[in-house]
Image: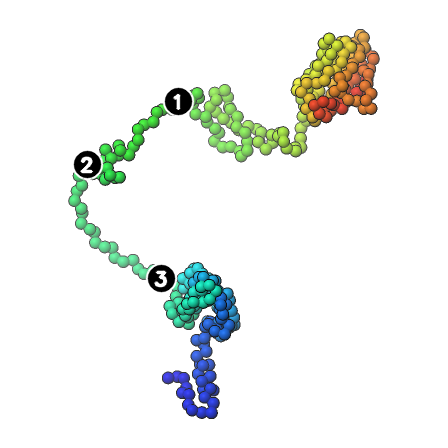
Amino acid sequence: MNLQTVNASASPEVQINENFEVLDWASVYGKDPVNSTGLTWGYFGGRWGGFAVAAGTFALADNAVNYIVIDAATGAISADTATTNWDDGINYRHIYKVTTVAGAVTVVEDHRNGSGGALAGGNGATGDTGPTGDTGLTGDTGPAGDSAYAVAVVGGFVGDEAAWLASLVGATGAAGADGAGSGDVIGPAGATDGVLALFDGATGKLLKAAAVNLAALAQLDAVQSWTKAQRGTAPAGLTSTAAATAIDLDAGNNFTMTMTEDSTLSAPSNPVQGQSGVIVITQDAATPRTLAYNAFWKFPGGTVPALTATASAVDVFTYYIESATRATCNLLADSK
């Protein structure tokens, strides 16, 4: 026995404490009863695996089995209700398995000196793969089978192969109606992402890449910066009939009008808020005419302007549609 015998003396506690000092290594990570209460687990410090371990405490999970381990690389202690680290014998060492119920420890298992325990050492790394064993003997050849499939038993069906396969295949469905096309559509060998596809020729079978990228197309609901001029078609011409001039704002933004009689510019059809444009008005080449305006057309200060009373004079009428019932207008007189 290596420990010294405790003899009768005036100070037997000295010998006892010296024996405890010899065994102190075994207490590292051991339960500290003084600092363990309820769900608080206390443990002793010391030295383990070359690490100086400080005594401490940590919280246990309630109503669970707590697996307490130490990290083999750092000596850090931790507890988890999952067995992931507990089962990892390479990177972790076992300490305790502690069961808690209703805020109290009910079962304590000390695994420090068991398989994979901190005091017993962990599992070593997996060894090298051993050499391949000899090839086994070839088995005897089985009896020759029948030339036919023999019997199949599937889902209660018993019969030969052909009948069995027929039982698995449903009836042929009705043929679909022929399409209106007359051949496959063939595209180019390569394409550029985002480029539109166009028909190449009139056959309806060949496709080609357009020169326009989808991102370059104008959009009606987006703020855009135009890099080329934007134009409408040739302005629609307005004509006075029975002293009244009709105007359809769906026909365009800009219009022309040559005076042939005294007339009134009627309220427009299809007015939409935000539309604007001009009417270029040319006077009668022989007799200057007058132009009155429907109450739809509003002028600065409420003053209705008069056309230039000179043969072939050109006035420019500008407008901005404010709503379905009014437009703000002005007349640029005698443009020359």
- Describe the element under mark 2 as helix, strand or loop: loop
Residue 193, given in percent of the width and then of the height, sits at: 53, 34
- Residue lying furthest left in this view? 143
Residue 251: image location, x then y, percent: 66, 18
Q: Residues within 10 Å of mark 1 (few under 14, many from 20)?
A: few
Give the x, y percent position of residue 161.
Answer: 23, 35
Q: Earlier in the sequence, mark 1 or mark 3?
A: 3
Could you tell me which secondary element the residue under label 3 belongs to? loop
Q: Is residue 229 above or below residue 129?
A: above
Earlier residue among tags 2 and 1: 2
Mark sitting earlier along the chain (3/2): 3
Contact (CB < 8 A) between labels 2 and 1?
no
Where residue 242 sits, quadrant-wise, is top right
Q: Which residue is mark 1?
A: 177
Q: Residues within 10 Å of mark 2 (few under 14, many from 20)?
A: few
Q: Please tell me which residue is depicted at 26% across the width and 33% down the height of the picture.
A: 167
- Residue assigned mark 2: 148
Dot 3 alpha-carbon crowd within 10 angstroms: few under 14, some 14 to 19, many 20 or more: few
Looking at the rendering, in which quadrant would you find the N terminus?
bottom left
For marks 3 and 2, give the CA distance. 50 Å
Q: Amino acid at mark 2?
A: Ala
Q: Nearer the viewer, residue 135 or 157?
A: 157
Amino acid at pointer 3 = Asp
Q: Residue at x 73, y 15 (%)?
A: 266
Residue 86's image quarter? bottom left
Q: Which residue is mark 3?
A: 128
Q: What amino acid is labelled 1 in the image?
A: Ala
User: Which one is nearer the viewer's eye here, 315 or 263?
Assistant: 263
Report whether residue 104 is seen.
yes
The answer to whether 240 is drawn above or below residue 254 in the figure is: above
Up/down of 17 relative to 319, above or below: below
